Image (cartoon, rainbow, N blue to C red):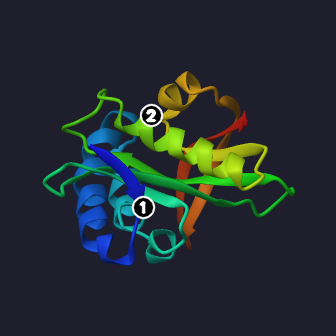
Amino acid sequence: MTIRTARPDDLARVDALLARAYPRLLRPDYPPSVMVLALPIIARARPELLSSGTYFVAETAEGEILGAGGWTPGRGALGRADVRHVVTDDRATRRGIGRAILSRVFETATAAGIRGLDCQSTRTAVPFYRALGFQPIRQITIPLAPGIAFPAMLLQRRL
C-alpha cells in the first residue's frame, strides 16, 4: 500500500469508497433517521479536495483505494487547518490505513507551517482520533443542508 496525493481522476473510486464504507461504519452510532438524510450528502467525494494537493489516498499495488483523507487551511485562526473527509474501507479497518493517511496529513501540514488541526469527527471515529493525539473539545452539529443536521464531535490536535 502506498499513500499518494489524490488526483481529480480519483473521484469515482473515492466516491465508491465513501458510498460503501460510511453506511457500514456509521450505522452503530447513528439512528436510521440521521443516516437516511445525511448519507447522500456526506458519502460523496469532494472534487475540490481531490484537486487541493493536501488530500491523500491509500492505494494497493493493484490500484484499489482503501482509504482517503487530508487537510485544508483553517477558516479561523492563522496556523490552523481542518482535517477533511477521512475514510477507511470498512473491510480493511484496523490495518493502519487511517493512521498512515493522518501521518501524511501531520507531515504535510507541519511543512506548510500549520501548528494545529481541527477535526469535525463522526461519533464513530472519535476513538481513532483520540489515539492519534486529538483532544475532544465539544459535541457539535454540522448543518449539511436546510433542515439536515449531523451530530459530530469537534477535536483538536497540536502539531
**Label located before the other in sequence (1 or 2):** 1
Task: Kindly tell me whether residue 33 is visible in this rendering.
Answer: no
**What's the residue at 31%, 57% (across, down)?**
18
SS category of the residue bearing label 1: helix
Q: Quadrant of the N terminus?
A: top left
Q: Position of residue 103 (x, y in %)?
A: 52, 38
Residue lying furthest top: 131
| Closer mark to the observer between disc 1 and disc 2 | 2
Q: Crowding near pointer 1: few (<14 within 10 Å), some, many (20+)?
A: some
Q: Helix or strand or loop: what does disc 2 sit on?
A: helix
| Residue 101 seen anywhere in this rendered image of the structure | yes
Q: CA distance from mark 1 to mark 2?
A: 21 Å
- Circle count: 2
Q: Which mark is residue 87?
A: none
Amino acid at circle 2: Arg
- Tell me what residue is drawn at x 61 percent, y 42 percent: 106
Q: Position of residue 107 (x, y in %)?
A: 60, 44
Position of the C terminus by quadrant: top right
What is the x, y in percent for residue 74? Answer: 74, 59
Q: Nearer the viewer, residue 93 or 30?
A: 93
Residue 136 sits in quarter: top right
Q: Which mark is residue 99?
A: 2
Residue picked out by circle 1: 42
Amino acid found under the numbered disc labelled 1: Ile
Is 103 situated above or below 135?
Answer: below
The image shows residue 135, relative to residue 14, as above or below, that is above
What's the residue at 43%, 37% (across, down)? 100
Q: Alpha-carbon neighbours of circle 2 within 10 Å: few (<14), some, or many (≥20)?
A: some
Query: Seen in the image, is 11 located left or right of residue 128?
Result: left
- Choose top left, top right, bottom left or bottom right for residue 92: top left
User: How far across and how far down the image is residue 33, in percent?
Assistant: 37, 52
